[in-house]
Image (cartoon, rainbow, N blue to C red):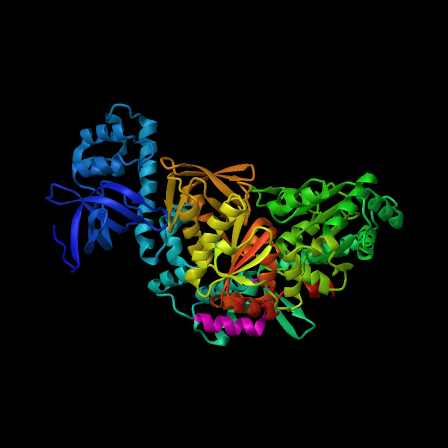
């Protein structure tokens, strides 16, 4: 067998597929070259191919240390099988719905090399085969035509790095005219197909001969720029800056970009908002609508009287204090009174400042008065914690508002509001603009809404800065809790969190080895000078400290929170290392660059309303069905099956980003912190990470990086218009 470094070409029948990745088309397969007795192993990207096809592959030979000689393909051409052997393999692969392996044998036995022509052009003749009637022949022909269209679409789109799963989504959206629709306007893919962005559309458009200044390109490019700005947290953007950004990204003149803005406004792709006749801001439609809805709901709720029964607030606070069995602080008494007195109010403060005591007292008073109370939080874990601290049922906002996947909207809304007189929402710093709009609309006109959150934490993952905008509008009563109570003063985690907020760089004495970490300290610093040393020491923290010294489950009881995704001490690499170290189970399923294993900790990365699982939910893989391609995940008792297309929304969660940890608490938190993370070293980032730890926080890294983060109080500002709408 040749082993030349020079490229060569093989042509033969694809005999069997050993491994396939539906997301990127990567295959390891056996190809039987023409006039050869034995098959050879080929590896590479072959999107959409099936057993039995004739492939012409170009590439180089290499030798795998475990599997021997392999042909690494750099490009390929495919054609339908012509030989009886190839046709038999092709039809028997399960490609055509209704044709089993046994039926494929009978069809090929009857028609031989003419089989595919018969199916395509004379499908009625399929009735000549035993077991095929008129209806089945029709069904086989319809499936064959659909597969042919998908195959042709795949061949058309593969050069533009469109994955097989995306090809299927495109076909489901546009049907057999998909290719014609794309040729007419490739940019519509970015709007209609999740995972396909402007850059992919642009590659197709260039090949179609669409010019840089084409209105189709410019209009889609403006929307793309606004989507990118939204991904950075903005709900609006000033016109002059938007024109400059668009012109730079699309490499067009500013005048062309400005003309495009007027077109997208006419077509209602974007909305504009003029502030005091000075600055014009642009918004995507749903952000424009969401901010308006919050402002309108605010006016509606504030302008109507409360539905609560009369409450003598001072007496009520005294009663709650007696029930609690300890004396409230003055600020806590004032906060309870304020919350009961106002239709809309905000309670904000850091860890240990008494938010839990206040909420528990408010809930007790309201229940005693027979007031209907509902409690919610943006995440499942935050809702569970709210239930535990108040003694009342807490649920996620999505479940509170009852999302209807068929309608694509919440069932509970302004016309069908919540059956509650008083709604309390915890972790309100996580509220993005769209979710906040749905929440505000669902509050009855006479009801109260209290938002509770820590304004010093990171803002929401989604666009907007709702809690901060509501506070800075000065239109809603706000209680700021600054005093740390005695029981919290004993916590080093609370002490260091407040020190960070005040810009004080103070850390405990560093230790050099995970073996030096001690059980009786809740905040410790393990020194590491670079990413490699940091990741290595994090592994040792899990094994030597969490498992051996603390006797905890390293998968369920400890969580790594990283500032960044990339790098040796980033989320991606740490997940790979921790999975290999902590999970020895053998049942697994490869998917893209990941391999999921039974027992893995995983995180959902996108809201999936059909499954009732939301962005940031963490679960454990309970089983893997490799034959049917199903992964079963347990999200705190909510057991969900993932088929292969759904796995794109699932990632390993031994390590998660600090942003993704919002609203959650963990017994033990491990934080890599190095100068290499300088792009993310901000005060609110490290503050958020530390306050996720319930019992232990271990920072692994460089004290200088900790100082950089603590001293950097400037976080990237978000452009929003909620404050302006509230103060008009």
337 or 557: nearer the eye? 557
Give the prevailing secondary structure in the magenta stretch.
helix
The residue that appears at 61% across and 63% down in the rendered structure is 684
728 or 574: nearer the eye? 574
Quadrant holding the C terminus: bottom right
Which image quadrant for residue 267?
bottom right
The residue that appears at 38% across and 41% down in the rendered structure is 588
Which image quadrant for residue 211?
bottom left
The residue that appears at 51% across and 56% down in the rendered structure is 516
181 or 399: nearer the eye? 399
Residue 1, percent from left and from top: 12, 50
Residue at the far left: name it. 35
Left or right: where 671 falls relative to 201:
right
Left or right: where 580 falls relative to 46:
right
Residue 52, percent from left and from top: 22, 40
Left or right: where 536 falls relative to 495:
left
């Amino acid at each position: 067998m040749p082993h030349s470094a020079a490229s060569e070409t093989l042509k033969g029948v694809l005999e069997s597929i050993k491994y396939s990745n539906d997301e990127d088309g990567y295959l390891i397969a056996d190809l039987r070259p023409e006039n050869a007795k034995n098959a050879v192993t080929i590896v590479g990207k072959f999107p959409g191919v099936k057993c039995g096809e004739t492939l012409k592959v170009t590439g180089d030979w290499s030798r795998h240390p475990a599997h021997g000689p392999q042909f690494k393909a750099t490009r390929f051409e495919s054609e339908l099988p012509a030989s009886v052997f190839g046709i038999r393999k092709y039809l028997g692969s399960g490609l055509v719905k209704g044709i089993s392996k046994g039926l494929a044998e009978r069809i090929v036995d009857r028609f031989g090399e003419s089989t595919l022509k018969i199916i395509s052009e004379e499908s009625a003749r399929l009735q000549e085969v035993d077991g095929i009637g008129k209806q089945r022949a029709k069904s086989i022909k319809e499936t064959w035509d659909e597969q042919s269209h998908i195959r042709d679409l795949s061949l058309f789109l593969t050069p533009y790095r469109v994955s097989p799963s995306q090809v299927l989504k495109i076909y489901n959206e546009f049907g057999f005219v998909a290719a014609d629709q794309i040729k007419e306007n490739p940019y519509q893919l970015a709007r209609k197909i999740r995972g396909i962005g402007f850059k992919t559309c642009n590659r197709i458009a260039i090949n179609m001969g669409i010019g840089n200044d084409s209105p189709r390109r410019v209009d889609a490019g403006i929307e793309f720029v606004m989507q990118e700005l939204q991904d950075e947290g903005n709900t609006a953007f000033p016109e002059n800056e938007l024109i400059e950004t668009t012109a730079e990204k699309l490499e067009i003149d500013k005048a062309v970009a400005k003309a495009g803005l007027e077109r997208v406004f006419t077509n209602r792709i974007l909305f504009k908002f003029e502030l005091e006749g000075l600055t014009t801001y642009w918004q995507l439609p749903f952000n424009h609508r969401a901010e308006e809805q919050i402002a309108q709901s605010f006016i509606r709720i504030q302008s109507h009287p409360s539905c609560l029964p009369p409450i003598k607030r001072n007496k009520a606070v005294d009663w709650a204090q007696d029930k609690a069995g300890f004396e409230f602080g003055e600020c806590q008494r004032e906060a309870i009174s304020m919350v009961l007195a106002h239709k809309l109010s905000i309670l904000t403060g850091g860890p240990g400042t008494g938010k839990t005591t206040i909420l528990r007292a408010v809930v007790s008073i309201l229940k005693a008065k027979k007031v209907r109370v509902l409690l919610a939080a943006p995440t499942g874990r935050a809702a569970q914690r709210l239930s535990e601290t108040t003694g009342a049922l807490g649920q996620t906002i999505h479940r509170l508002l009852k999302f209807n996947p068929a309608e694509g909207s919440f069932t509970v809304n302004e016309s069908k509001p919540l059956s509650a007189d008083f709604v309390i929402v915890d972790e309100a710093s996580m509220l993005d603009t769209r979710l906040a709009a749905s929440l505000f609309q669902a509050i009855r006109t006479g009801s109260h809404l209290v938002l509770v959150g820590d304004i010093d934490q990171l803002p929401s993952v989604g666009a907007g800065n709702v809690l901060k905008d509501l506070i800075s509008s000065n239109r809603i009563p706000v209680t700021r809790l600054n005093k740390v109570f005695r029981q919290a003063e004993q916590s080093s985690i609370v002490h260091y969190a407040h020190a960070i907020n005040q810009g004080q760089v103070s850390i405990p004495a560093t230790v050099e080895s995970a073996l030096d970490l001690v059980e009786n300290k809740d905040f410790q610093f393990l020194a590491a000078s670079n990413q490699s040393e940091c990741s290595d020491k994090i592994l040792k923290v899990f094994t030597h400290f969490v498992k051996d010294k603390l006797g905890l489950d390293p998968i369920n009881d400890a969580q790594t929170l990283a500032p960044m995704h990339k790098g040796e001490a980033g989320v991606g690499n740490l997940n790979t290392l921790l999975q290999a170290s902590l999970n020895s189970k053998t049942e697994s399923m490869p998917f893209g660059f990941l391999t999921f294993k039974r027992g893995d900790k995983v995180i959902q990365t996108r809201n999936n309303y059909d499954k009732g699982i939301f962005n940031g939910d963490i679960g454990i893989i309970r089983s893997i069905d490799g034959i049917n391609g199903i992964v079963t995940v347990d999200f705190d008792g909510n057991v969900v099956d993932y088929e292969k297309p759904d796995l794109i929304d699932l990632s390993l969660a031994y390590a998660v980003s600090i942003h993704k940890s919002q609203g959650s608490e963990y017994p033990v938190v491990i934080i890599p912190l190095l100068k290499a993370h300088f792009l993310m070293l901000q005060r609110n980032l490290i503050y958020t990470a530390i306050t996720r730890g319930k019992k232990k926080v271990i920072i692994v890294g460089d004290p200088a990086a900790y100082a950089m983060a603590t001293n950097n109080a400037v976080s990237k500002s978000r452009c929003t218009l909620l404050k302006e709408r509230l103060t008009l």
